[in-house]
Image (spheres, rainbow, N blue to C red):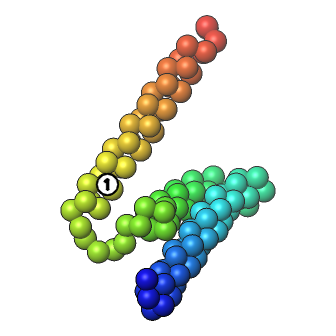
């Protein structure tokens, strides 16, 4: 292997590591901010829900970009991956709401 290809490979590995470090940092920040907002009660309830939702969407973008390496170029495989991820998220959220609603009905105190 020539010196030039070795240097290019080292730079690419360093760039990829830096991308992962940025991703972890942003994901951690986007996780801690909503926890802090809820813990210290710094906002009204409706504004807090909207803020948490926006930060959750931002975290999804961070995960897609830094960990799944899905950029803003349109490729068919990327679209399929995003749609499959959205389907899984929908199934998990809908299932959680269904289970929690069922538990709420079953745990209700009789009148």
Q: Position of residue 64 (x, y in %)?
A: 43, 63
Residue lying at the far bottom of the rendered structure: 4
Please state, as top left, top right, bottom left or bottom right, where the N terminus lies in the image.
bottom left
Up-down relation of residue 110 to residue 18 (above or below): above
Residue lying at the far top of the rendered structure: 110
Up-down relation of residue 6 to residue 106 (above or below): below
Q: Is residue 70 left or right of residue 101?
A: left
Name the residue: 36% across, 49% down: 86
Q: Position of residue 36 (x, y in %)?
A: 73, 58
Count of residue discs: 1
Name the residue: 44% across, 31% down: 95
Residue tagged 1: 81
Give the image quarter of residue 80. bottom left
Name the residue: 38% across, 42% down: 88
> In the depicted view, which residue is nearer to us: 7 or 24?
7
> In the depicted view, which residue is nearer to us: 18 or 1?
1
Residue lying at the far right of the rendered structure: 40
Residue 26 at least partly seen: no
Q: Position of residue 12 (x, y in %)?
A: 48, 80
Residue lying at the far front of the rendered structure: 1
Q: Is residue 85 left or right of residue 15?
A: left
SS for tag 1? helix
> In the depicted view, which residue is nearer to us: 75 or 56?
75
Please state, as top left, top right, bottom left or bottom right, where the C terminus lies in the image.
top right
Up-down relation of residue 2 to residue 73 (above or below): below
Name the residue: 76% across, 52% down: 39
Q: Position of residue 100 (x, y in %)?
A: 53, 27
Give the image quarter of residue 107. top right
Residue 92 at least partly seen: yes
């Amino acid at each position: 292997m020539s010196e030039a290809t070795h240097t290019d490979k080292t730079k690419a590995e360093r760039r990829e590591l830096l991308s992962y470090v940025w991703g972890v940092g942003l994901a951690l920040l986007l996780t801690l901010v909503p926890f802090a907002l809820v813990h210290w009660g710094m906002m009204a309830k409706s504004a807090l829900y909207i803020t948490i939702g926006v930060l959750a969407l931002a975290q999804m973008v961070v995960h897609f970009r830094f960990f799944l390496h899905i950029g803003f170029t349109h490729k068919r495989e990327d679209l399929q991956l995003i749609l499959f991820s959205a389907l899984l998220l929908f199934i998990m959220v809908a299932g959680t709401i269904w289970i929690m609603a069922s538990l709420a009905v079953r745990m209700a105190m009789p009148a």
